[in-house]
Amino acid sequence: MLKVKGLAKDYIVLGERKRVLEGISFTVNDGEILGITGKSGSGKSTLLRILRGVESFDEGSIELDGKCFFPDSDKDNMKTLIRNTAIHLQRNFGLWNGPAIENIIRRINSRREGHDGLPEKDSPFYDEIYKESMEYLKTVGLEHKALHVTSALSGGEKQRLILARQLAAKPKLLLLDEPVTMTGPGTKQEVLDVIKNIKKEFNISIIVVSHLPELHMYIADRLIYLEDGHIIEEGKTETVLKHFLKDMQPQVELAPLKKKEPVIKVKGINKRLALIRVGEVLNFKGLSLDIHRGEIVSLIGQSGAGKTTLLKMIEGLTSPASGEILYLHDGEWIDITHFSPKRMELRKKISIMHQEFTLSPHSTIGQQIGFKMRIKGPRSLEYARKKAKEMNVPEEILDMLYALPDQEEEEKDKIMQQMQITPEMYGKLFPKVTFEDVKEHAAKIFEALDLPLEILYKTPYQISGGEHVRAYIALALTTHPEILMLDEPFGDLDPVTLRDVTNALKRINKEFGTTIIIVSHHMDFVKEVSHRTILIDDAKVVNDGDPLEVSDQLIEMSHASYLKRTMGSLIAGN
């Protein structure tokens, strides 16, 4: 059993003391799953790190399995807390290479010997350890994958293997921080069923932090609603969720699509990719589709179905082996997959948000918008072309430099290092922008996103989680793009903040006529924001049409029973 009494935590932020948790008290019985929900920045993840023993606290006490821990407990005492807890993070795939079972063997050996090396197969305890490891794999339904290398496992299988490895440490408390948020419905169902099985078989205390109402309704015995570091309510899961969602803004109406006028044509693209999972291939064969002007289109499908690869090809950041990806530009169709002088003009009309989006922590929002305006502002391209000629920079290199800010950070850094490009190059090629220009330019965008202009003066540390996301959307919209592409950028948002962002996207679409293409695993979001939804499976379009119908087909294909009760049904009172 876990007992938490009067827990409090302070952080020093920019020289000021800020209380992020206050008076936190609750219990979790053995064999019980306690859910924790709340808005972004409410203190949920901080609380889990404290319970794990890797974060200090300032007031209160923690009692686990009869042992008590206090703010002044010594390191040896806190090591006891660490040994008796295990934590699973959403994006943690820190697995050992080699057969899956060796991850469990190493963890059991660590428990016995104090290190996670592999014991020799002829050691006295090897057969015993191997047998115990198989039992943990059976718990998570992976006994048939025991000898498969970890790189050959699917995302859901990796998640389950991590859970098995955590269980092998024999914790008294299992902590799960957003364990399934960024995965498809099928993978979510696999992991949630494993968590329910762990509760049944191990009779340990389990805490699950998640923004997803449907997750809590499927597995949580009780729910805590956390806000601004305080417990607002604790009780029956659905009752607490209804109270949490009561502050959700009403839906903004989706602007109707007046006519179907294609602005992007994907024509007969072919591309073959070997997946990380051994023996599996993603093979696009003659895929074609149109995107219409002013349309919000969502691409959905299981993890690994090809959604992100397709989006990257549409963005012009990954090239197909053959086929065309055409954009209507000034009355002419331009193929974004091949260099031409007009491709940079085309890129100027496009803005991209990736999964791992982030704002620079050391620059104000205004400074970051100013940089974007330098690259894609009204006269930036003409200025850069003139400067490039003066510096003897070929048009092809300028084209590549122009595309770099749209790449994901890791890929961008890799290319810049290979090409020996420094950030100073942009300062030489692109025009300066004044802060007055930034304020004037941002005013209408900030109004549409319901953001105060004062945020221009603040760094990401000084704004809320919801403001952070909307500020990033503002950054993406800085150049008034005609086309906005979003690759699962909102998976970590709580439903209240997500509604604000969804409404903001609808307002942007209505106000500026922006064409928006979205990749998302979040079915409520897809149903609410889309004019049209395209279901991708095994690199093929298997359905293209009404968002409700297409989303429900994916849910059925995924056998996702956890989605029988969703946020939408909860709000409707069903």
Image (cartoon, grey):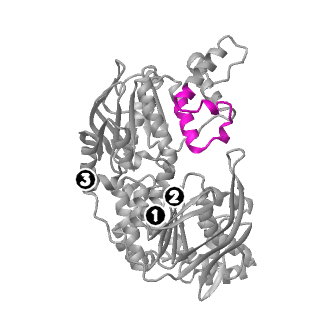
Q: Amino acid at mark 1?
A: Tyr
Q: Of label 3 and label 1, which has the lower sequence position?
A: 1
In what element is the residue under mark 2? loop
Q: Amino acid at mark 2?
A: Phe
Q: Amino acid at mark 3?
A: Gly
Residue furthest toward the bottom?
Answer: 331
Query: Circle 1 sits on which residue?
Result: 472
Residue 5 position in % (x across, y down)? 27, 29
- Kindly check if marks 1 and 2 are in contact, taking CB atoms under 8 A apart as contact: yes
- Answer whether residue 89 is visible to the viewer in this image: no
Quarter of the figure with residue 150: top right
- Kindly check if marks 3 and 1 are in contact, taking CB atoms under 8 A apart as contact: no
In what element is the residue under mark 1? helix
Q: Of label 2 and label 3, which has the lower sequence position?
A: 2
In what element is the residue under mark 3? loop
Query: Circle 2 sits on which residue?
Result: 357
Q: Which mark is residue 573?
A: 3
Task: Give, as a single range, the part of the protein colored magenta.
Answer: 136-164
